[in-house]
């Protein structure tokens, strides 16, 4: 089939990769001037991968498939873009998210190393004594290097015969005819159109606004105190800092700096292009959410603030919508990147065999 893929974030790139491997003729359209597009949700330096999920979500049952898909991709790209440094969680309150992740790890039979506060501070001296109940470590996780993955996939697709176009903004889609209209006035037509446009999907399918909500968020890159630099360089990623912070930390990895991110720091918006510039004091506001359990938080210097837009469903499950020849796919949460390679394989398989219902069930982790 002749298939057009709209959007070169991780879902679009992985879908194009899998479609090419299945023998389809693929055209990939990216509105940004580069791949990756730095404004896209998956255009940042790194994202966390881990097995930890709440036992009730079902996504913990899919993560092995995601690891397998990444391994297949590393084989095609000729190198791995995963820094397997493991992850830690810090629990500060009974029943907080870190504890829910622990329950998910235990339910899945994945080993963790539980440390009391004194041992945890000794091992990771950037933690604040007396500010948490316990911490635990899993070797099964780390940081995916997003920009390297995107650049590698774009190169692989070009070498493999796909048409890859940057600066090609899609402004309309005729789902019944499989016709895509570009901002330049050009049109393309395919047997199928896969829309993996992330937070921009509502510009193309506004009728999905009842199911998808867009948020503007930001991440703070920081420079830690000099005497803690070595500890952070060797540290696992921090999946959750406990309490109600909904916060994660990625140490320096893959040539990129250290960053703080929190689910608390997001603002609903109807426009993915809204307010993309950092606001004065925004980096410090994000950083300050991490004390406790991070000690000496005021000594962490803000080096950069990066904004991005995410699309969410109410239950934060992955999403697919079929209309005519068009298929809209979205990760719909901040945790979608780690499944990117597996999503691409599943979308390509569904396009080939027509089992869109099965794809939707998998995306919602109903088959786990």
Image (cartoon, rainbow, N blue to C red):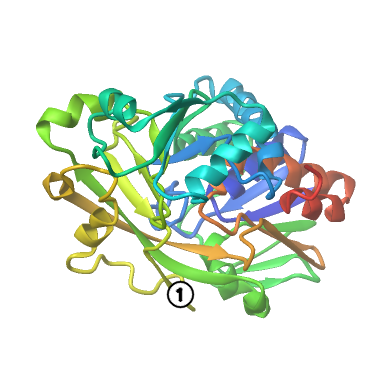
For the question of whether residue 82 can be seen, the reply is no
For the question of whether residue 29 can be seen, the reply is yes
**Seen in the image, is 237 located left or right of residue 69?**
left
Q: Quadrant of the C terminus?
A: top right
Q: Residue 146, position in %: x, y?
A: 44, 39
Q: Residue 94, position in %: x, y?
A: 48, 49
- For the point 12% across and 37% down, which residue is it? 225
Q: Nearer the viewer, residue 31 or 321?
A: 321
**Seen in the image, is 234 located left or right of residue 155?**
left
- For the point 74% across and 48% down, which residue is it? 365
Which element carries disc 1, helix, strand or loop? strand
Mark 1, other Cα within 10 Å: few <14 / some 14–19 / many ≥20:
some
125 over 53 or under it: above or below = above
Q: Nearer the viewer, residue 99 or 30?
A: 99
Q: Nearer the viewer, residue 167 or 71?
A: 71
Q: Number of callouts in the render?
A: 1
202 over 251 or under it: above or below = below
Which image quadrant for residue 279?
Answer: bottom left
Q: Residue 267, position in %: x, y?
A: 41, 72
Q: Residue 308, position in %: x, y?
A: 40, 60
**Seen in the image, is 238 located left or right of residue 292?**
right
- For the point 48% across and 35% down, which residue is it? 149
Q: Badge 1 is on which residue?
A: 268
- For the point 54% across and 49% down, which residue is it? 335
């Amino acid at each position: 089939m002749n298939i057009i893929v709209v959007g070169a974030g991780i879902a679009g790139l992985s879908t194009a990769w899998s479609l090419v491997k299945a023998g389809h003729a693929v055209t990939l359209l990216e509105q940004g001037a580069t791949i990756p597009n730095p404004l896209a949700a998956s255009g940042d330096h790194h994202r966390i991968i881990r097995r930890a999920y709440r036992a009730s979500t079902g996504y913990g049952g899919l993560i092995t498939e995601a690891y397998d898909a990444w391994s297949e991709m590393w084989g095609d790209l000729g190198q791995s873009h995963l820094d397997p440094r493991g992850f830690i969680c810090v629990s500060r309150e009974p029943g907080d998210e870190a504890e829910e992740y622990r329950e998910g790890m235990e339910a899945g039979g994945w080993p963790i190393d539980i440390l009391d506060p004194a041992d945890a501070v000794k091992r990771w001296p950037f933690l604040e004594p007396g500010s948490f109940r316990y911490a635990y470590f899993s070797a099964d996780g780390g940081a995916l290097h997003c920009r390297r993955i995107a650049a590698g996939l774009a190169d692989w697709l070009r070498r493999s015969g796909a048409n890859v176009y940057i600066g090609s903004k899609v402004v309309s889609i005729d789902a019944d005819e499989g016709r895509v209209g570009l901002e330049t006035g050009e049109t393309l037509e395919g047997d199928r159109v896969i829309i993996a446009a992330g937070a921009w999907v509502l510009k193309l399918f506004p009728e999905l606004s009842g199911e998808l909500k867009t948020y503007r968020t930001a991440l703070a890159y920081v420079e830690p105190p000099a005497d803690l630099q070595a500890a952070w360089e060797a540290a696992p990623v921090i999946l959750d800092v406990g309490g109600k912070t909904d916060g994660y930390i990625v140490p320096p990895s893959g040539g990129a700096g250290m960053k703080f991110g929190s689910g608390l720091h997001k603002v609903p918006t109807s426009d993915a292009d809204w307010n993309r510039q950092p606001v004065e004091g925004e980096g410090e506001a994000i950083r300050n959410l991490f004390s406790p359990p991070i000690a000496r938080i005021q000594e962490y210097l803000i080096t950069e603030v990066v904004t991005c837009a995410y699309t969410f469903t109410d239950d934060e499950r992955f999403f697919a919508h079929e209309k005519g020849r068009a298929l809209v796919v979205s990760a719909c949460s901040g945790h979608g990147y780690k499944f990117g390679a597996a999503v691409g394989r599943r979308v390509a398989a569904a396009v080939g065999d027509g089992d869109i219902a099965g794809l939707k069930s998998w995306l919602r982790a109903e088959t786990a």
